[in-house]
Amino acid sequence: MTVDNSVEPTRRARQVRHCAWCGRRVPDAGRQGRPRLYCAQACRQRAYERRTAVQRGGLPEDSVVLSAAELADLQDRLFQLRCAAEDVVTAVDDAADRSDLRKLAAQVVDVAAELERLR
């Protein structure tokens, strides 16, 4: 009986990373060093602009600053999620078949995934 004493280098499990600004998936470049925080230079720039605006305005560091258009978009997506959830409840009350419920549940998941994107 032989024992294999060779040591294989361990690799870190690759985590899915999301952009700190827009929430999109950050491409895995496979580089060494610090992991990327932003998916693109434009997102990095927007984050810098927000940080400097927060520092000048005296807002707390963990503040989330949204424009009126971004707030309206967020409210629209929340409304879509509520409507999708109400559709599921109505379908359950009406004793809809399993395939219809699955489609409605998938729609709720899709709307919720879109809602996760803050910007």
Image (tube, grey):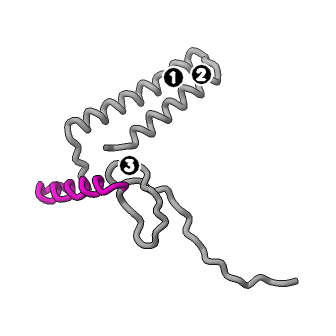
Q: Which label was assigned to residue 42? A: none
Q: For the residue marked with disc 1, what is the amino acid?
A: Val
Q: Is residue 73 left or right of residue 29?
A: left
Label 2 element class: helix
Q: Which span of residues is magenta-colored?
A: 39-60
Of tags 1 and 3, the one toward the viewer is: 3
Q: For the residue marked with disc 2, what is the amino acid?
A: Asp
The residue under label 2 is 100
Mark 1 nearby-residue class (10 Å; few <14, some 14–19, many ≥20): some
The image quarter in which residue 51 lies:
bottom left
Of tags 2 and 1, the one toward the viewer is: 2
Q: Residue at x 55, y 69 (%)?
A: 12
The image quarter in which residue 99 lies:
top right
Q: Which of disc 3 and disc 2 is earlier in sequence?
A: 3
Mark 3 nearby-residue class (10 Å; few <14, some 14–19, many ≥20): some
Q: Residue at x 48, y 21 (%)?
A: 87
Task: Please name the predominant secondary structure of the magenta segment in the image.
Answer: helix
Q: Position of residue 116 (x, y in %)?
A: 40, 42
The residue under label 1 is 89
Q: Position of residue 115 (x, y in %)?
A: 39, 38
The image quarter in which residue 4 lies:
bottom right
Q: Which label was assigned to residue 23? A: 3
Label 3 element class: loop
C-alpha distance separating marks 2 and 3: 30 Å
Instruction: Decide whether residue 47 is among the magenta residues.
Output: yes
C-alpha distance separating marks 1 and 3: 29 Å
